[in-house]
Amino acid sequence: MVLNVLKTLLPGILSFGIGIGIAPFLTHFLYAKKMWKSRAGKKALDGSDTPIFNKLHETRETGTPKMGGIIVWATTIITALVLWILPQIISSGIFSKLDFISRGQTWLPILALLLGAIVGLLDDFLEVKGSGSHIAGGLSLTKRLAAVALVSLLAALWFFYKLEVNSITFPFLGEISLGWLFIPLFVLIALAVYSGGVIDGIDGLAGGVFAIMFGAYAFIAFFQNQFNLAAFCAALVGSILAFLWFNIPPARFYLSETGTMALTITLTIIAFMTDVLGEGKGIAVLPIIAAPLFITTLSVIIQMVSKKWRGKKVFLVAPLHHHFEAIGWTPAKITMRYWVLSVLFAMIGTIVALIG
């Protein structure tokens, strides 16, 4: 048991240290290349202007680089490689125990993390280089959704055909077979989680929320005896905390698409890994553990529907955290309260996962 605890926690500590170590080099590069938008602001999903948002953020999005999410996924992958290489160099049982790269538990989430990161990095690069005369830049929403759908579809097919998983488990109801419907459900859940990535809009907000969510799944995976997956989640937590060290106001850089796309796709896959495969309820508790993401998405949907059918807005600005900004909450207050609620949601979801 002690070795399994070490296997889970040490990757998190190592990834934090590696992240802190590479951050200054990444920061220097991003500032030297001026990897930020030349013009602040954004457009709403329906193409309309967002004057309140643009006023709130008129000094935030210029002068602070995007692509800070590189620290998260690069650090996690470096950590995995270091712990995989060490046993090849040093013949010691403890080092072989710390290696968490495994075909059965971590190949798929690591690959998803990398694919999401690459597509997100492309979007960030295009947004930075293409924002000179327009507020909008980067890949279109349609293309980003298509990329998430494609990656999640490949993962769903792997679950369905390779791992022979076609069901999910509900608390108190047990396992429910879905047949081929498992595949589109997988994709829809991935898209829903990804949509919550717009929570990355205030210094420190997304980093804290994501660290808490992956921490909860590390705990769940550990109690399912999926120690490699738990270690991978812990490594992600460590790398996110390293990012957060430099993202706390005033932020040195932003998580941006390369971070949010990588993390949301990976979170979906981990939720499925801790479901039937782990004899648990990883999907059923996802709406609880990831409640901040789903609430963020819901606020955007409510705003769009209200504007279309009622001709007026429900919130001053959507997503919800920007509404709180607009009514006078300080960014620090919003961030800290989201962290507090995220911890509570994570605790509730973990309890349901373990005893439901």
Image: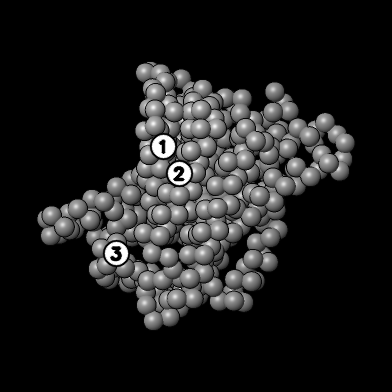
Extreme-left residue of the structure: 310
Instruction: Give x and y (percent) for residue 228.
Output: 65, 34
Residue 183 disc label: 1
Q: Who comes first in sequence, dot 2 or dot 3?
A: 3
Rounded to the nearest whole Å, what is the CA distance between mark 1 and mark 3? 30 Å
Q: Nearer the viewer, mark 2 or mark 3?
A: 2
- Residue at position x 75%, y 43% from top? 83
Residue at screen point 34% across, 49% down = 296
* Element type where label 1 sits in the image: helix
Residue 344 position in % (x across, y down): 43, 36
Kind of residue sitting beneath label 3: Ala
Q: Which label number is shown at residue 127?
A: none
Within-10-Å neighbours for mark 2: few <14, some 14–19, many 20+: some
Query: Please, what secondary structure does the residue beneath circle 3 have?
Result: loop
Q: Are marks 2 and 1 in contact (CB under 8 Å)?
A: yes
| Residue 197 appears in the rendering | no
The circle on residue 44 is 3
Quadrant of the frame with the C terminus: top left
On the image, which quarter does residue 284 sit in? top left
Residue linked to disc 2: 153
